[in-house]
Each structure stands twice: as C-alpha cells, then as structure tokens.
C-alpha cells in the first residue's frame, strides 16, 4: 500500500509518490503530471474531472466548476447538472481522481496521503480539506503547509542548510509569500503574506485585452464563448513566452482572422500593474517575520506563474537575490508533501515542521467574577500559537482546605467550557491549600499530530501526566457514508471512457475556436467517433479516435 503527497491547488492539482529513495511524479490517465482542478457534469449528469472538465468551462460554463478551493470552509455551493455540490465534495472528486490515477500508475492501492494547504488556511478550511479527503477514501494523517512543503523539497535537493528562506508561490489566481526559517531540522514558517486576487489569470486577462485593443475589438462586448476563445489563446501565448522570445497569436472570430505578435517586453508593458502588486506581499512578509531583506539566504519560486522569465527577473530586482532554480515550480509542493509522507519510514531524515494551533486549548476554572459556581475557560495554549508548543500556567485553590484537583480540559474559543469540546479529565490530590493560594502548575504540550500532553505538578512536587489524542476524524462514520454514497451515484468513468470524453471535450472546444470551414471537418470526425462509441465497435473507435485527435493536433499547431 502506497502513501502519496498531494498538491490540491486552486487551478491545478498533482500527486507525487516516494519510491526508491526519491519523489516520483505520478502521470494521470491522460499522460500529464498536472490535473486541472475542474469538475463538470455531462448531459446525463455524470461527473467529469480534470482537463476535459477544464475544456468544458468554455463550452459548458454553467455545468462546470473551478477555483472551489477558494470556498473551502465556507457554505458556498454550486449546482452542476441539477445536483448541488459543496466545495468539499468538488475537492473530493479531484482527490478521488488523483487517487485512482496514482493507483493505476503505481500498480498498488493508495490509501494514505499528505495534502498541502495554504499556510493561511484557517481551521474551517483545513477541516473542509480533511473532509474532502475522507470522502475520496484517502486517509490523511495530517496536512502540510504549502511553503513548508516547498522548503522541504528544496532542502532534500540541496542539503539541509540552516537559514532563512523566502518562498514565493505565484499560481493561477493567488500569490503567497512566506518567510521560512530552517534551524536544526526544524522548519518554521515565520510569516505569510499574500494577494489572493493576483495570479496567472491576470496576465491572461491583460494579454486578452491587449489583443482586442490592438485589433479594434471591444473585449467587454464579445460573447462569452468568444471571450473564452481569446482568453485561452492569451494564456497559451503567455505560457509559450516562457520558453520562446516571441509568439504569434492568431484567433479566428466571426469569420475573420485576428493576429498579434507578443514579446516578453510587450508583456511587461501591458502587465505593469500586476508586477507592481507583487511588491507589497514581499515587503509585508519580510516585515512580519521581523527579518530584513539582507537576512534572506535563498528565494524559492513555486507555482506556474513563476515559470515566467519576466516574473523571475522582477523578483530578482525587488529582492536583490537571484532566485533558486533547483526546484520545479509546478511539482515542488507535491514533492515536499510526498517526502514528508515518506519520512515515517525511518531511513529518511526526520524534520519537524511547525504549524499554527487552529484552536485554543485550556482548562475550566471557577468563575471568580460572578462567583456563582459557574466555570469559565482558562486558555493555556492560545489559538494561532506556533506548534509544537509547550506552555505552563499556575492555578490557585478555589476554596480553603482544598486537597484535590480535578482538571477538565477543553478545546475551543468560547468562554463557557460547555460550549467547547471536552477533551478529558485529570485528577490528583494535593497538600491542603487556602483559597487563592497557589495549588499547582499545569503544562500543556501540543504537537502538530494532534497529541496533547498535560502535566500537573502540585506545590509539594507530586506530578501527574496524561496524554490525549485530539479528534482525528472530523466526520462521523454515518455522515461519511451518506456523503460518499451521494457522490458515488454521480461517478462513472472507466479510465478508457475518460480518454474518449477528453477527446470529445477537446474537439468541442477547438470547434468553437475555429473558422466555419474547419468546423464542418471537425463535426464530421466527431460524428464518426461518436457513432463508433455508440456501437461499441472497438476497432472503429480506435480508428476514429486517431483520426479526430490527429486532426485536432494539426489545428492546434
Ligand atoms: P495553483 O497553485 O493556482 O493551482 P499553478 O501553480 O499550477 O496553480 O499555476 C497555474 C498558473 O500558472 C496558470 O495561470 C498558468 O497559466 C500558469 N503557468 C503554467 N505554466 C506556465 C508557463 N510555462 N509560463 C507561464 N505561466 C504558466
Ligand atoms: Mg499552488
């Protein structure tokens, strides 16, 4: 049974395994490392996941969803093909796909995963991610913060060197900047800052608008399909500019061919505002980490938009540091998650990743203000404290001649213990105390794996210790079963079907982007292919599949 690392991204997701002492990127059923985080419902209400779903964002926008990671932990839902889906459910469909692809690729069952989440994800979003994992049938022992995963990937490649790192993650729709400290095998996130409305999408939009402007087209006035066609071409041109100096854009719209030549210099000019907005999160992350720019030893770039040479140069300009090029911006986070998953195997170096405590841990004490016998929470480890942490507090007797202590331990933010989650109880006797005299010290130690250790020491030196495991499963078995059967009802897709669906989705997209005369050729091929599928004629399916995909390849240069 294998264990994998998963980068569950806003735009793209991917999975990495750890085999023969190194991370191995998992190819999905379409032969790509990257699975777009998109879900679509087809005409019979069946669910399509990944690239074909992404293609359908253009051809069937009202039956397709993307960017649901932004809504994790909220009550937002979307309706696809008549069914309502929560962000957890949509994410679980992506995870399920990654799991199935990993199993096919590795040839063994995959039941456990480490999933990365943004460092700023709060408790709700983290819970939602765990729920998504449970729904997909994956065991998630823990989540890993994206910048920690990126750092882990860097350190594994370059050796564990103490230092201060800046991780810049520039994805499809978000920019996250983190300052990460590595000391004695402890990886600690010192600060995170970001702009959750800035990413590769903005470059696409800028190029699309520029294309229209130069061609005397009104971008705002285009139909939604035309807009999507221009937008897709803009994204492709932007991506190509990461490896070639100049790109010719050619878009057929309303029987007319529009063209534009794009260079990186031009791209910088039309994206001035975007570049300007990269500065602030970089400044803020440094500031909040109480470090100076001079303290940063290495800048690690991850996220698809960091493939852009213009972005790399801009970051070099504002930090004064030549960014590292040893990690792959697309896969670093998933690799880090896989490395962390493999660390359980003793032969791998063990590092400690710090995290933020998502809730408060404390004990119930008498309400001295009301003095009515009611109890209030006395926090010991406050929410947002860095983990692992160990904090001690002293408590005094609540009445004269007190000879025993009963500690009730709770987790939660409410001042009334009853409203919080009861974790457990610890009892011990003590020498007689007067009211308000110190009676004991309570030390709580909490690590990122959800283990809470409580030590109580009385004034005469007597000690008691108890360990608790905080709730690892966030849903009841019943809830999981109910949600799972609902999801399974809408799942189909044998792997071979999926390849066919992907081709159909692609053909439909290219059809929409083509001139009229080309359209009829595509339509004919598509019809032949569909007919073969319908008859389940495997030889004809193979022939027509090849004919159609060859045609699309030539049309999409
Ligand atoms: P997320 O973290 O949001 O899931 P990714 O890190 O996968 O996203 O980044 C996706 C973004 O990266 C998209 O906007 C895409 O256009 C952009 N991108 C991917 N490859 C390249 C490339 N070679 N050049 C420029 N941009 C790229
Ligand atoms: Mg990402």
Image (spheres, rainbow, N blue to C red):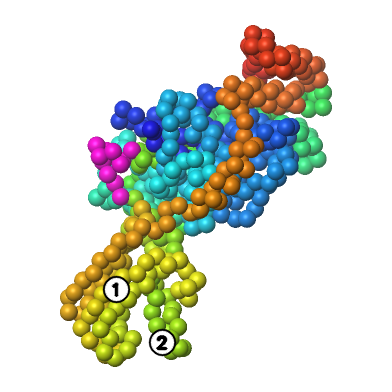
Residue 187 makes an appearance in the image: yes
The N terminus lies in which quarter of the figure?
Answer: top left
- Horizontal and vertical percent for residue 165? 36, 48
Quarter of the figure with residue 23: top left
Q: Position of residue 273 (x, y in %)?
A: 60, 47
The magenta stretch is 342-352
Would you say 76 lies left or right of 446 here? right
Residues under numbered marks 2 and 1 in contact, where contact means CB atoms less than 8 Å apart? no
Residue drawn at x 80%, y 16% as measured from the top left: 520
Q: Is residue 365 above or below residue 149?
A: below
- Residue 207 seen by the camera: no
Around disc 2, counting alpha carbons within 10 Å, would you say few (fewer than 14), some (14 to 19), or many (20 or more)?
few
Nearer to me, 275 or 55: 55
Q: Is residue 223 left or right of residue 379?
A: right
Residue picked out by circle 1: 427
Please determine whether, in this image, residue 144 is positioned above or below residue 469: above
Q: At 39% from the left edge and 76% from the top edge, which residue is drawn?
A: 364
What is the magenta segment's predominant secondary structure? loop
Q: Which residue is pictured at 32% across the width and 89% down the height?
A: 399
Q: Where is residue 366 shown, x and y percent of the image?
A: 40, 83
The image quarter in which residue 515 lies = top right
| Alpha carbon distance from label 2 to label 1 | 21 Å
* Badge number at residue 368: 2
């Amino acid at each position: 049974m294998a264990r994998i690392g998963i980068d569950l991204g806003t735009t793209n997701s991917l999975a990495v395994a750890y085999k023969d002492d190194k991370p191995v990127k998992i190819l999905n059923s379409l032969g790509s490392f990257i699975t777009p985080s998109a879900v679509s419902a087809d005409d019979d209400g069946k669910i399509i996941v990944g690239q074909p779903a992404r293609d359908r964002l253009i051809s069937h926008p009202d039956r397709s969803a993307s960017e649901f990671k932004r809504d994790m932990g909220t009550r937002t839902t979307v309706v696809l093909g008549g069914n309502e889906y929560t962000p957890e459910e949509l994410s679980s469909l992506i995870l399920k796909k990654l799991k199935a692809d990993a199993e096919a690729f590795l040839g063994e069952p995959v039941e456990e995963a480490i999933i990365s989440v943004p460092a700023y994800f709060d408790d709700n979003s983290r819970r939602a991610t765990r729920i998504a994992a449970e729904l997909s049938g994956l065991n998630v022992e823990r989540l890993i913060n994206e910048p920690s995963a990126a750092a882990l990937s860097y350190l594994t490649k370059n050796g564990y060197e103490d230092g201060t790192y800046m991780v810049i993650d520039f994805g499809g729709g978000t920019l996250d900047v983190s300052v990460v400290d590595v000391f004695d095998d402890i990886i600690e996130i010192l600060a995170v800052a970001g702009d959750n409305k800035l990413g590769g999408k903005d470059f696409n939009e800028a190029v699309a608008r520029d294309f229209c402007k130069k061609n005397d087209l009104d971008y705002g006035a285009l139909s939604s399909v035309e807009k999507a066609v221009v937008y897709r071409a803009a994204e492709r041109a932007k991506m190509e500019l990461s490896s070639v100096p100049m790109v010719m854009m050619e878009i057929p719209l309303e029987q007319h061919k529009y063209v534009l030549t794009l260079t990186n210099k031009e791209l910088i000019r039309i994206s001035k505002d975007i570049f300007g907005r990269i500065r602030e999160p970089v400044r803020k992350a440094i500031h909040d980490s109480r470090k100076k720019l001079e303290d940063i030893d290495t800048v690690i770039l991850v996220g698809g938009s960091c493939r852009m040479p213009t972005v790399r140069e801009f970051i070099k300009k504002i930090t004064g540091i030549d960014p590292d090029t040893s990690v792959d911006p697309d896969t670093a986070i998933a690799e880090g998650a896989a490395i962390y998953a493999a660390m359980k195997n003793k032969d791998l170096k063990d590092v400690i990743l710090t995290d933020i405590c998502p809730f408060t841990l404390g004990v119930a004490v008498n309400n001295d203000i009301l003095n009515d016998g009611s109890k209030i929470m006395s926090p010991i480890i406050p929410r947002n404290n860095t983990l692992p942490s160990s904090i001690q507090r002293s408590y005094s007797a609540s009445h004269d001649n007190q000879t025993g202590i009963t500690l009730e331990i709770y987790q939660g933010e409410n001042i009334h213990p009853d409203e919080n989650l009861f974790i457990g109880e610890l009892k011990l006797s003590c020498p007689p105390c007067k009211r308000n005299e110190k009676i004991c010290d309570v030390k709580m130690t909490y690590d990122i794996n959800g283990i809470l250790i409580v030590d109580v020491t009385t004034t005469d030196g007597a000690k008691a210790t108890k360990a608790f495991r905080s709730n690892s499963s966030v849903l009841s078995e019943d809830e999981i079963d109910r949600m799972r059967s609902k999801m399974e009802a809408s799942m189909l897709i044998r792997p071979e079907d999926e390849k066919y669906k992907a081709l159909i989705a692609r053909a439909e997209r290219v059809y929409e982007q083509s001139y009229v005369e080309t359209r009829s050729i595509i339509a004919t091929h598509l019809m032949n292919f569909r007919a073969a599928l319908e008859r389940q004629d495997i030889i004809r399916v193979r022939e027509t599949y090849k004919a159609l995909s060859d045609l699309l390849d030539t049309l999409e240069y």
